[in-house]
Image (cartoon, coloured by chain):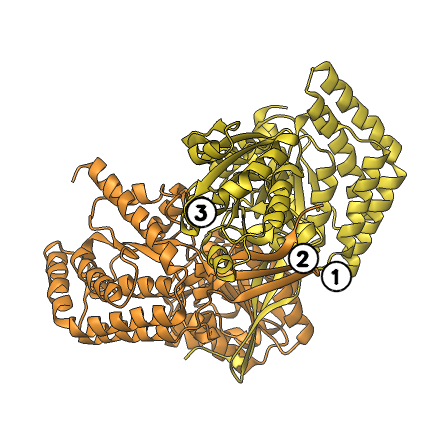
Chain colours: A orange, B yellow
Amino acid sequence: MENNEIKQAVMMKASAAKEASRKLSVMTSGQKNNMLAAMAEALAQNAKEILFHNEIDVDAAKDAGLSAALIDRLTLDEKRIGDMIKGVKDVILLEDPVGSCVEEYKPSIEIDIKKIRVPLGVISMIYESRPNVTVDAATLCLKAGNAVVLKGGSEAINSNRILAKIISEAGVKAGMPAGAVQFIDTTDRTAVLEMIKLKYFIDLLIPRGSEELVNFINQNSSIPVLSHGKGLCHTYVDKDADMDMAFKIAFNAKCQRPGVCNAMETLLVHKDIASKFLPQMCKNYFDSGVKINGCALTKSIVPSVNEASEENWSKEYHDLELSIKVVNSIEEAIAHINKYGSMHSDAIITNNKEAADKFLMEVDSAAVFHNASTRLHDGSVFGLGCEIGISTMKLHARGTMGIKELTTTKYVVRGSGTIRN
Amino acid sequence: MENNEIKQAVMMKASAAKEASRKLSVMTSGQKNNMLAAMAEALAQNAKEILFHNEIDVDAAKDAGLSAALIDRLTLDEKRIGDMIKGVKDVILLEDPVGSCVEEYKPSIEIDIKKIRVPLGVISMIYESRPNVTVDAATLCLKAGNAVVLKGGSEAINSNRILAKIISEAGVKAGMPAGAVQFIDTTDRTAVLEMIKLKYFIDLLIPRGSEELVNFINQNSSIPVLSHGKGLCHTYVDKDADMDMAFKIAFNAKCQRPGVCNAMETLLVHKDIASKFLPQMCKNYFDSGVKINGCALTKSIVPSVNEASEENWSKEYHDLELSIKVVNSIEEAIAHINKYGSMHSDAIITNNKEAADKFLMEVDSAAVFHNASTRLHDGSVFGLGCEIGISTMKLHARGTMGIKELTTTKYVVRGSGTIRN
């Protein structure tokens, strides 16, 4: 296709999604759940066809010499299709946020004001290799009453196309407004460049994927963006920490799954406890293959660590590697976190209530933890039922985001001939 | 000052505000109210000095031949200083949103999660001629625990400088962290261009003033922006409307204060009621000097109206001028509003509950009204106690915004050695 044709196709799809979103916004939870149930069933019935199209992508990825990790993310099998179907069923079980009353005002006898949750309208997802996002994202948006415009990675285009086709057709048969699920069927970059300008049709963009992709969208979109921020998380072991608890939590925060955004990257230790705490803690890390970059004081206590430089305090390893710094006070720990952290997830280990309260109040992060691992910052652990990501922004949504963040509000005012005097 | 000096000065001020914001964020409501009370008193004690500096601005504005309206907005007198002081006292009475619990999760016995309101950090206000904004904005931000960076219009620089000095000094004497109120003391445009880049120090920008200013900030800021949107509001008179109520509300929505964003710009009338309703309604408008641009059907009923063209449906008059369109159905009315409106405030007049519910649900606006005037969309009418503006955005804040919108949230998680399995 020519650039202009692509642009026009994208605009037509976004415009059709807007129209469908009007109809979706007034559907009941029961109607929406019926659509979703039909989608789950259609995915099960068409598993073979999905695998057939997925194989085309996987073969092409192998021919192109893509990395084993990427090919793994791209590959579907019966189990992964089962997980996808389970995901849709989980969305059916989620409470529908639409219509719920957030606040109520009764400024005078003749007027009644309710602030209620309503869908955002049209949500566009821009994502990379994992085909399951096509289904996960679409169903979550639909449950919150939004139409969705899907733009997946080029390496997964055959898988995404068939998945979008299956859920869209099954949805429409079960009463979904035609056009509510739009799939941008091109690998041309022009499509994304066009999408991020369509603010009259698309109400929210959610980019998922590499930091590069997310930054590009954030900087160039004229549509509001909800994005998953980077995570440079800390654990601070206070002088009044329970030592065994500190060993356990600091180990969990680094080692349980080091590649994710809520894993710890820097361990801060109060000087009064450092010489008792660090030798055993570092041994535990070394035994699990963790590379440690410590400050001069850490190195004087555990000589086998590497010496950290200033850059280490700003480093997200996302791997079995860790920075350790000994601090003189809780104030220094808090200042360090507020200076070098990414305002994501930070923890204090202490039995001192005052110290805990001070830390929880003064650390300026989306989630702060007392005697708990930063790894707990997660929608499913918190009981949200689902997670769109963890926002490190301060507006609209902060920290783990659930289905509620896919809605906005509206004031509904009922009067009886009421005017402004 | 040279450009580089201005840039550096702005950065230093924003950085100092960030530091002060850390201290402000942990202050109690009582401490913050004390600061505000001291500011109110200092304004009263220094009224003469304020008027002296204001006169310099007013004289310069007169010499420069600025418009009478602008000079009026710029001018302070004892009454206006009194209003300013009253405004500060009103802010003292506002409930402090900081620390309040928004949501609570208890996913397991050993973990306790609270989502609480916390200050945003540093808020920058960019505004034009009215010097009272210096005091109104600063005190509202401070009450929500935020530091503030003020950049007023060049024509009010002497007034703004003295007001900022008085409240800042009085605040510090009463315990406010030094640096919490920053005044950008230059009329050079470089300052604004620099401010809107400082995303590591400033958490939110609030532009107030001309559409041009607001659009410029929105398009060029790398800091999140909360802005007051434009208002193209509608009133729809349904076939089941109470005629007297419709006369009253439709008149109020247009004429009570035509220059503001929640005044009606387009009146939609159901065809079944048009020939009964329009002659008297138009007479009422004509008697008050309203210029009417009507569709062909309107003109056939009231020949003395001007004929409307397509552009009229997108026109914000902000004056005694109105578009009128006869529609065939409530569906047409809703579609018209969703197409031409600015998603601000729209009303239906009807005694038919079903029609009202349909309208309230399907019109995609920040506030929807049944048997009430769009002019009621206002923080003080709704009982918020204050208003920062009316947002037509869908993220973070929608519709009239109060002090709560000057905060964000934070997850506070308390465990007992809790880790992720």
* Residue A57, position as x, y percentages in the image: 14, 59
Viewer-proximal residue among B347 and A263:
B347
Q: Is residue A36 left or right of residue B200?
A: left
Label 1 sits on residue: B28
Q: Is residue A305 visible?
A: no
Q: Say whether disc 3 or disc 1 marks the residue closer to the N-terminus.
A: 1
For the point 76% across and 55% down, the residue is: B32
Query: x%, y% of residue A235?
Result: 52, 68
Q: Amino acid at mark 2?
A: Ser
- Answer with the quarter of the image where residue B66 lies: top right
Residue ID for mark 3: B333
Three-letter residue code for mark 3 = Ala
- At mark 3, the secondary structure is helix
Q: For residue B205, say whether it is visible.
A: yes
Q: Report the number of numbered marks.
A: 3
Residue denoted by label 2:
B25
User: For this view, does B234 lie left or right of residue B165?
Assistant: left
Residue at point 79%, 22% (across, down): B56
Disc 1 and disc 2: Cα gap in Å?
9 Å
Tag 1 subunit = B
Asked if marks 1 and 2 touch (Cβ < 8 Å), the reply is no
